[in-house]
Image (cartoon, rainbow, N blue to C red):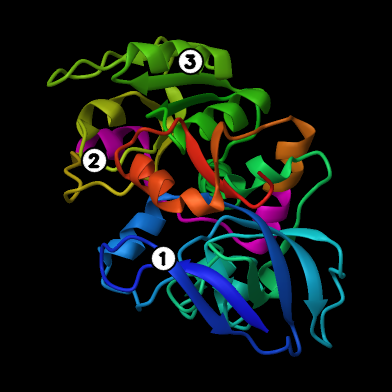
Amino acid sequence: MKIQGLAAKTSGAELEPYSYEAPSPQNFQCIIKVLSCGICHSDLHMVDNDWEMSNYPIIPGHEVIGEVIEIGSQVNHIKVGDRVGIGWQRTSCLSCRDCLRGSENLCDEMQALIATGPGGFADYLEVDSRFAFAIPDGIKTNVAGPLLCGGITVYSALRYAGMGSGLEIGVIGVGGLGHLAVQFASKLGNRVTVFTTSKDKAEFAHELGANETVIVEKNQPPSAPSQPLNILLSTVPASIDWASYIDFLDSDGTLTLVGVPDAPLSIPGFPLLMKRRRILGSVIGGRAMMQEMLSVAERYQIEPIVEIFPMEKVNEAMEKVRNNQVRYRAVLSHQL
């Protein structure tokens, strides 16, 4: 079948119509009719080739929600008519040690959706059905996409840092990632402290469920929270006062990074040694973690806050994301 997409043909270019032929799905493949697709900053990085892994023409989009219209002969966990979502990961080897213990996202042969083929800024998408996830009935189509990237990123990071309930959890930054982290942490019964440079976002963090906010003044060290933190999640893509934040951790506390700092970390050793603290990095999540996250999101009514654009206004939407003018996630929809 011929698929109509929106592609950047050179680095940094605007997206324009582009079509390609997709074969009939074989074995574990399936074809979905795209209903909506979130826009992530990673889409911009890929369009701009910031990570030197882009292949042009590139069709972005890795927060895809769609309806299954055709399946391969080996597909038995989803069926035609199901509503499914596809995130950053296209596939993995499914046989290495990481894959066999449920960490497919850590597989050395992991393929990213838009780095190894077309993404979801299109009318249809062919994917490996084993990385297409049934979307629970209680999650709306136009808000589901960002959960498949931003949602799983923060949820997996918090869970692997030890998040349960009854803990003191800090979140640095209230953006596309942070506003979801606050919801997951608070609705699962934890006390949440938010660190932000914005008074408006501090007020909004309380609406999301934060118990305490710390406004960090420019070029000033952050003030300490009222309680030592068991987990501190950094969602910001910048270098910050790591030494101060390490000191905010309780004994056996964990600093977890999902935002990529713009310079190597500078961390003093003694505060880690003397309180047995640790630093953890995390990226998306495996298939079991994805399903758990979607279940939690439905049960506790956790939703990304989105601004919805019709698919034909993709360049306008991308520019707003590029200029940080969207609070908090942008979504392209075929349903407008």
CA neighbours of label 3 inside 10 A, class few (<14), some (14 to 19), many (20+): some
Q: Mark 3 touching mark 1, by CB under 8 A? A: no
> Residue at left 47%, top 74%?
18
First of labels 3, 2 by sequence position = 3
> Which numbered disc, 3 or 1, marks the residue that appears first in the sequence?
1
**Mark number displayed over residue 288:** none
* Residue at mark 3 to residue at mark 2: CA–CA distance: 22 Å
Q: Amino acid at mark 1?
A: Glu
Q: Residues within 10 Å of mark 2 (few under 14, many from 20)?
A: few
Range shown magenta:
270-292
Q: Quadrant of residue 85?
A: bottom right
Disc 2 marks which residue?
A: 238
Residue placed most toward the observer, 291 or 39: 39
Mark 3 is on which residue type? Phe
Residue 271 on the magenta span: yes
Residue that carries the numbered disc 1 in the rendered image: 16
Image quarter where the N terminus lies is bottom right
Q: Upstream in the sequence, badge 2 or badge 1?
A: 1
Q: Amino acid at mark 2?
A: Ala
Dividing the picture into quadrants, the one containing residue 32 is bottom right
Are the residues at dot 3 and dot 2 in contact (C-beta closer than 8 Å)? no
Magenta stretch: residue 334 in it? no
**Residue 336 coordinates in the image, percent (x, y):** 66, 43
Tag 3's secondary structure? helix
- Quickly name the residue at label 3: 204
Between disc 2 and disc 1, the foreground one is 1
Residue 87's spot in the image, x, y percent?
58, 60
Above or below: residue 67 compared with residue 184:
below
Number of the front mark, 3 or 1: 1
